[in-house]
Amino acid sequence: MNEGGRYHTWRDRAMSLKSEGQSVPANSEWPKVLRETRIAGLFVIAVSFFGLAAWSLFLERHFALTFDYAFYGQAWFLIAHGHFDPFSSVANTFFWQNAFELLMWPIALLWYVWPHAVTLLWVQDAATAATEALLFTWMCEATAVAFNAKQLKDWYVAFPLAGLILLIVNPWTLWINSFDFHPESIDLLMVIWMAHAFWQGRNRRGWTMTGMTLLGGALGATYVIGTGISAFLAGRKWRKIGIPLAVVGLLALLFISAVGANKAGGVVYQNLISGSHFKTVTPFTLAQSMIEHPSRAISAMWAVRLDIFANISAGGFIGLLNPWTFGIVFLTLLEGSLTGLANYAQPYVQNSLPVALLMPLGTMVVCLALSTSRRRWLKPFGSILLVLAVANAIGWSIVWSPRVEFQFASVSASAVDSLNYALSTIPSNDEVIVSQGVAGRFALRQWIYPIFVDPPSTFPIHTRVVWFVVVPNQGIETESTLGAEAELDQIANDLHARLVSDSNGVFVFRWTPPSRQKDVTFQPMTVVPAWTLDAGASKPATSGPPKEWHMETTGGAGYVVWGDYWRPKAGPVTATLKFKSSGSFTMQVVNDTTGQPVISRTFRSTHGSIETRSISGVLKYGPPSLAFAGRGPFTVHPTEPPPGNVIEIKVSTPGHSKISIYSVGLKNS
């Protein structure tokens, strides 16, 4: 560089993009105990990977893959089959326009290794375990640096061991990996590899991994910006690299926005921009919105303060003070919390993976720094805070880890059998319209449409044969049971689709649409057919014309129909029942939220004739049932339930009489 501050050569320019890095002792110079600790820790991480992979296989086999997996799974399938610019019917956009996630193209090669839905889940698990291994290695290296400087005593291995515990027992890692497939784990592996290389002063490797990280699109670019912030804050050795990294990440984001590759960025579109005059989202419009409406940003973050707390608490609060942790974690928390919605800010959504994995590194390094401080009064705080962090992480794990199965494994074994039958029956070239809670394994095809909202809803038609797989009461459904039951009635009666299977709450229809029909639209209904409901002492009778289908008793005592869930307004309500019977039975309208009956009526024999009866009552709201939020200090702000109380119509029989239920309905009077 000359006196005017200009560069003479490209070599001079390149030197400006280098960092000095941390001098780490060679592995052979480490104490034997630390080397053995590193090997043992990596072995523990490998074991945890196989456990996570087994859990992923369980989830895949039980159809616990939803809308998000369908989005990535369809792209994976299409790219592997030669559709190099795949259109996502799931998100109604070209896949690259989601967030410019180019890494899916090389991942598509894995289709030829193991062409099954679980493959993407295993890729996610492997990336998570590799990130944990890299972070644990970083912890051991930081310990070796401190030991080499003769700043630690004999119990120095307690630091990386505590960091390992923080990594392994954090429940949010398990929760996040249980929720479909997302590229966060792969992007995070690349950026940690990049940050670790710059930390060591291995600049060529660092810049190579920067390019790899940017294959993750908008998310990878955000991580690069976060690493730039961290490097700038880390000290003189890395300051020169921090600003170029942040600039590269920002330019990548601007490019992605300029080419229109941010059309499906869910978190951003729920951010401060929502409801503003901006039609597109860029870093500048987001910043402009925050400047114009600072109170909105503060209010949004305050609304999800418990989720922010839960995010950083499980890995140790003080980890946020470490520069190498701060950048990415800060941007991640900011992005999620600015929505003001628990859906995006909760610690068990995919956006929070960087927080779950990076906070243990920060906590361990901060405690190590305190224990090696020149100020003697600070030294005890290192070990004290580390012990408290480990105890706190174990507390979060005890409260939240056991609930993973309850949250995600929500498809019964019998329904799994019926879904497997449907999957094996439907040709891969046919279009499938399927309940979003089980959509993932049906996504390995060109045309799939998950049903995730209540009617009215419209779905395009692309193939000569269309299949409907509707599961009203299985899986993590975003559509109401009432909406699914209304669709079933219209599929059978209006579309005249052929019922292929109706076992265990799984309804499969095959439909050949008219040649000129371009789409199918479903409308909401206030009366639903009884054959779509859950059976007890009954079975569905689905022979003959669909208008005559019904639920009929099998001779025993119990519920004839149940499982219809309504959310009427408080006040007068009227329930209707279409039936015929040879004996008496009871109809109840029950407030499931409070457990209290609203209306109860006994009907007698109709002597073989079909009748429609109505009963009226007054619905009084009770306090809404709350989602699980944790225990004591290990609490999150859960997703708010829909407004109102859940009302159910139940028909029960004492047995020994033949009862046929054709439909049930409920509306405000």
Image (cartoon, grey):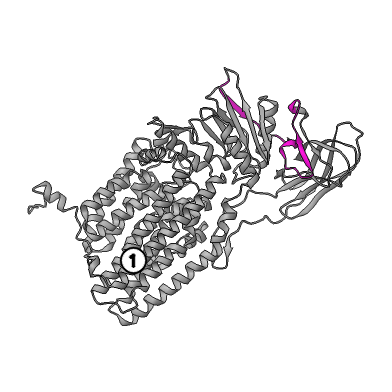
Q: Quadrant of residue 372?
A: bottom left
What's the amino acid at mark 1? Arg
Magenta range is 517-546
Which of these two is toward me, 53 or 511?
A: 53
Residue 452: x and y, percent? 57, 39
Residue depicted at 72% across the width and 40% down the height: 533
Q: Total label count? A: 1
**Quadrant location of the C terminus in the rendered image:** top right
Q: Is residue 160 visible?
A: yes
Residue 228, image x and y in percent? 29, 54
Please tell me whether residue 371 belongs to the stretch shown in magenta. no
In the visual, does 572 lie left or right of 632?
right
Name the secondary structure under disc 1.
helix
Q: Position of residue 176 (x, y in %)?
A: 48, 53
In-front residue for pair 78/326: 78
Residue placed furthest toward the top: 516
Which residue, given by chain and number where applicable, does mark 1 sit on? 38
> Callout 1: few (<14), some (14-19), or many (20+) C-alpha neighbours within 10 Å?
many
**Is the residue 46 above or below the residue 557 in the image?**
below
Taking the view exactly as shown, the residue that stands out farthest to the bottom is 376
Foreground pick, 518 / 252 = 518
Left or right of 232 in this view: 290: right
Give the quarter of the image for residue 130.
bottom left
Q: Is residue 215 above or below residue 429?
A: below
Q: Is residue 34 above or below residue 14?
A: below
> In this rendering, would 526 be left or right of 327?
right
Residue pictured at 31% horizontal, 43% vertical: 252
Q: Nearer the viewer, residue 532 or 266?
A: 532
Q: Position of residue 625 (x, y in %)?
A: 67, 55
* Residue under the point 48% across and 71% down: 391
